């Protein structure tokens, strides 16, 4: 399922080899369909 993982400028970028559904932890939340990438970005403490 995971095709590639990159670490770029403090972000982790995961490429999925097929479209999938994921649960989003965002302001509007909910399910996301048809995703091909997962990006983990950590906000610095002073901006939170």
Image (cartoon, helix red, strand yellow):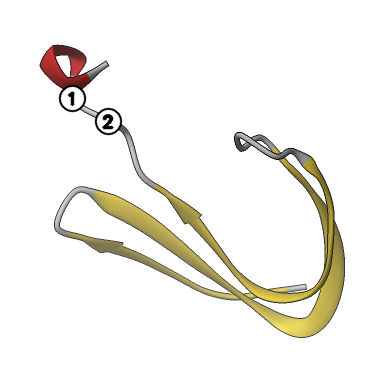
Total residue callouts: 2
Residue at point 35%, 44% (across, down): 41
- Residue in view at x 86 percent, y 72 percent: 20
Q: Residue 37's quadrant in the figure?
A: bottom right
Q: Look at mark 2 in the image and give the residue it sits on.
A: 43
Residue 8: x and y in percent read 21, 63
Q: Is residue 47 left or right of residue 5?
A: left
Would you say 10 lies left or right of 40 here? left
Circle 2 residues within 10 Å: few <14, some 14–19, many ≥20: few
Q: Residue furthest front?
A: 28
User: If the image is split into quadrants, where does the C terminus sit?
Assistant: top left
For label 1, count other residues whose C-alpha is less than 10 Å away and answer few (under 14), some (14-19) or many (20+). few
**Residue 12 — which label?**
none
Q: Which residue is mark 1?
A: 44
Q: Is residue 26 above or below residue 20?
A: above
Q: Quadrant of residue 5?
A: bottom left
Tell me residue 35's x, y (percent): 73, 74
> x and y percent of residue 32 in the render?
81, 60
Measure the alpha-carbon separation of dots 2 and 1: 4 Å
Tag 2, which secondary structure?
loop
**Image height of 11 relative to 5, above or below:** above
Q: Residue at x 78, y 73 (%)?
A: 1
């Amino acid at each position: 399922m995971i095709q590639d993982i990159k670490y770029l400028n403090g972000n982790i970028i995961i490429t999925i080899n097929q479209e999938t559904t994921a649960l989003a932890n965002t302001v509007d939340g909910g399910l996301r369909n048809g995703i091909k990438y997962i990006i983990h970005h950590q906000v610095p403490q002073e901006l939170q």
